Image (spheres, rainbow, N blue to C red):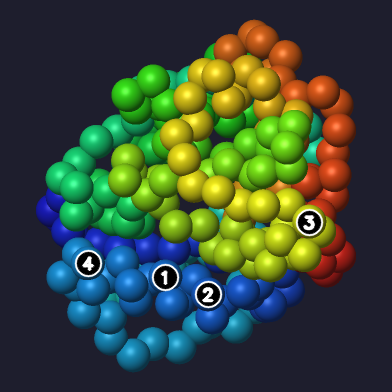
Amino acid sequence: MEKGPRSAVFTTVRARSGKLFHLDLHLKRLSKHAKILGIEIPKFEIPSGLDGLVKIQVDSSGVQFSTKPFYQEIHMEAEGITIPAPRWARKIMGTKHGDWEIYREITSQVFAKGADVGLLVHDFCIVDGDRVMPLVLDEDGIVWISDDKHGGVDSVTFDVCQSSIESAGFVISKGRLNERIVARAKEFVLLGTGMGAARLTVLDGVDIGDGSDNLQKTCIDALGSDWW
């Protein structure tokens, strides 16, 4: 089967006892990315009784569902390493596309080195994570996220948390997550369907943040107690 980026589109949803969390947002993103990739999504029904991390993929064979258990994905604290970000054509960047195997390989490298997460670097800035979206809180209460010019993927988990982050008094701003911003971070939060809302404490062997967890707690509350 063709493995190019336009060969498939997918999303991964968190499920427990048949409940798929924020499915509407996942399907909205799936449709958006499919349109960019030129993939038509047929009508389909969600199987009952799904549990774990559920991958919904659309390719030439139709719609497939696959699941994997949570294992120890959720972390309250996490250690990370930086890895060069994969690159594709500009239109492909930022989508959940069919040429995703390299991300799984990156995650395997991360685990092999004893880390919890890989942060993807391009042009000396963090643009995304292997399976998380990075949020960097500075001393002025600004939450920096990577701008969408360098390939960061839309995050459903961030969409869920965004209004709560703003209601808590934080200001969200898009920019370049360069070494200076990261080094001076008050708090560094990782959002993802599998990981939840983890706080990055070490990056490439260097301590990150001042130990505060206000942003993390805001995100955990936004996701809801039943999500965990």
Residue 8's quadrant in the figure? Answer: bottom left
Q: Nearer the viewer, mark 2 or mark 3?
A: 3
Q: Residue furthest top?
A: 205
> Image check: 70 left or right of 26?
right
Q: What residue type is labelled 2?
A: Leu
Q: What residue type is labelled 4?
A: Ile
Q: Distance between the residues labelled 2 and 3?
A: 24 Å
The quarter of the image holding the C terminus is bottom right
Identify which residue is drawn at 66% across, 10% down.
206
Determine the image quadrant of residue 48.
bottom right
Q: Separation of disc 3 and disc 4 at Cα?
A: 34 Å
The Cα–Cα distance between marks 2 and 4, rounded to whole angstroms, is: 17 Å
Residue named by callout 3? 169
Q: Which residue is drawn at 45% across and 34% down?
A: 176
Q: Which of marks 2 and 4 is nearer the N terminus?
A: 2
Q: Which mark is residue 25?
A: 2
Q: Left or right? Give the position of 7 relative to 153.
A: left
Residue 52, position in %: x, y?
64, 60
Dot 3 amino acid type: Gly
The residue where tag 1 is placed is 29
Tell me: 123 left or right of 36: right
26 or 219, nearer to the observer = 219
